[in-house]
Image: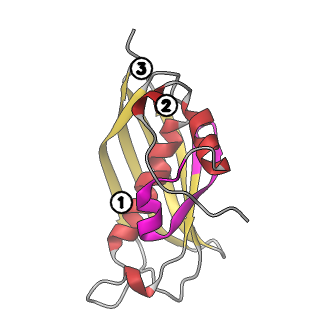
């Protein structure tokens, strides 16, 4: 079993290939997983054109003072899934950034919830803007949160 390596690739490496190829390389271990994935304990587990899934397990270390998992855990999983769904559509040399994200937390995550999946799905990809939607569900399919995002696309530099 390979141990996950965490880090950040040089921007040049990122821009030398299309988004789907890069994300598949990250999943295969060719490129490191982002440090935030180690910090919060989640991983990119599925990726296809217009779709990305991150999996994690809410734990006591994610708790806030009111006795449940901090909303930032769910929001980070959703931000990752929704943005990476858009990332899969990038052509070589293109980049992007999140402009806004709207998250609805519909029930609390706890350490008893077990593993969860955040799935992001592309809604629209234009020349300069893209939108996606997604949700967090447990192994039984129970919904915990849903979200939408808008990202700005930066064209490849010629």
Identify residue for label 1. 103
Tell me, for residue 127, which label it has, or none. 3
Q: Which residue is mark 2?
A: 13
Task: Give neighbour class at mark 3: few <14, some 14-19, many 20+ (Cα, 10 Å).
Answer: few
Q: Nearer the viewer, mark 2 or mark 3?
A: 2
Place of residue 33 in the rendered image (x, y in percent of width and height, measured from the top left): 52, 53
Q: Is residue 49 inside the magenta stretch?
A: yes
Label 2 Cα neighbours within 10 Å, binned few <14 / some 14-19 / many ≥20: few
Q: Nearer the viewer, mark 1 or mark 2?
A: 2
Q: Which quadrant does the N terminus fall into?
A: bottom right
Number of dots carrying numbers? 3
Q: For numbered disc 3, what is the local secondary structure?
A: loop
User: Of marks 3 and 1, which one's residue comes earlier in the chain?
Assistant: 1
Mark-to-mark CA distance, 1 and 2:
31 Å
The image quarter in which residue 146 lies? bottom left
Q: Position of residue 2 (x, y in %)?
A: 69, 61
Residue at horizontal 33%, vertical 50%?
Answer: 101
Q: CA distance from mark 2 to mark 3?
A: 22 Å
Residue 76: say if magenta.
no
Mark 1: secondary structure: strand
At x 47%, y 65%, the residue is 38
User: Is 20 on the left or on the right of 124, as rendered?
Assistant: right
Q: Residue furthest top?
A: 158
Mark 1 is surrounded, within 10 Å at the Cα level, by few (under 14), some (14 to 19) or many (20 or more) other residues, namely: some
* Quarter where residue 35 is shown: bottom left
The magenta stretch is: 32-52
């Amino acid at each position: 079993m390979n141990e996950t390596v965490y880090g950040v690739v040089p921007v040049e490496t990122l821009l030398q290939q299309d988004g789907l190829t890069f994300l598949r390389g990250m999943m295969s271990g060719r490129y490191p997983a982002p440090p935030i994935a180690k910090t919060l304990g989640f991983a990119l587990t599925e990726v296809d054109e217009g779709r990305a899934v991150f999996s994690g397990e809410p734990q006591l270390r994610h708790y806030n003072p009111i006795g449940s998992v901090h909303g930032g855990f769910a929001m980070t999983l959703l931000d990752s899934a929704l943005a990476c769904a858009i990332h899969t559509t990038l052509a070589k040399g293109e980049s992007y950034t999140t402009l806004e994200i709207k998250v609805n937390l519909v029930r609390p995550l706890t350490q008893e919830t077990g593993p969860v999946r955040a799935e992001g799905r592309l809604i629209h990809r234009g020349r300069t803007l893209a939108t996606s939607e997604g949700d967090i569900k447990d192994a039984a399919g129970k919904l915990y949160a849903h979200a939408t995002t808008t990202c700005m696309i930066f064209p490849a530099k010629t």
